């Protein structure tokens, strides 16, 4: 089995910062892309940022210049540094990982979600 466990969410004032972490564990052979989605109340889940195994990154236009995604391959962990937070960043943030399990089967893992609330 594979688990993704997120941490780092919380309540912050507009203009503040938060750092999210997500650690993958279990029967993992390798991890390709990792990233973060978010879902605000009444809205569809949207892609926030992705990072490939080689370190290439991509961001939603709404977070470019404010959010930074990174990963520690040795720890199977992906991070999301969020600066200059805005009330519209309020959402549940989910991490994901495209990985290969030790069985040889591909697996799309998802975290349980962590709440980020930005007050104005």
Image (cartoon, grey):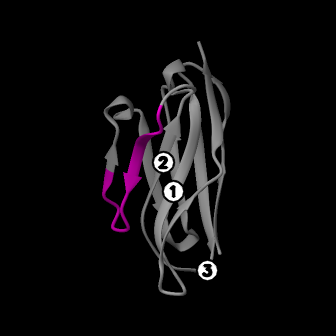
Which residue is painted at 31% across and 58% down in the image? 56
Element under disc 2: strand
Q: Which mark is residue 27?
A: 3
Q: Which residues are magenta?
A: 44-57
Q: Which mark is residue 36?
A: 2
First in sequence, mark 3 or 1: give its number. Answer: 3
Which residue is painted at 34% across and 35% down in the image? 64
Q: Position of residue 2 (x, y in %)?
A: 62, 71
Element under disc 3: loop
First in sequence, mark 2 or 3: give its number. Answer: 3
Circles 3 and 1 in contact, beta carbons < 8 Å: no
Q: Position of residue 9 (x, y in %)?
A: 66, 39
Out of 117 and 14, give the one closest to the viewer.
Answer: 117
Q: How far is mark 2 from mark 3, CA to CA?
A: 21 Å
Out of 74 and 53, give the one closest to the viewer.
Answer: 53
Q: Is residue 50 magenta?
A: yes
Q: Which residue is mark 1?
A: 96
Mark 1 Cα within 10 Å, few/some/many (few <14, many 20+)?
A: many
């Amino acid at each position: 089995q594979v688990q993704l466990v997120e941490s780092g969410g919380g309540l912050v004032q507009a203009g503040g910062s938060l750092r999210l972490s997500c650690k993958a564990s279990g029967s993992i052979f390798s991890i390709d892309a990792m990233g973060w989605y978010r879902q605000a109340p009444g809205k569809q889940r949207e892609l926030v940022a992705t990072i490939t195994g080689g370190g290439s990154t991509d961001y939603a236009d709404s977070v470019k210049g404010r959010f930074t995604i990174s990963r520690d391959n040795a720890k199977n962990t992906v991070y999301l540094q969020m600066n200059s937070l805005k009330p519209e960043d309020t959402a549940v943030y989910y991490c994901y990982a495209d990985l290969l399990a030790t069985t040889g089967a591909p697996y799309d893992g998802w975290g349980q979600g962590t709440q980020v609330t930005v007050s104005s």
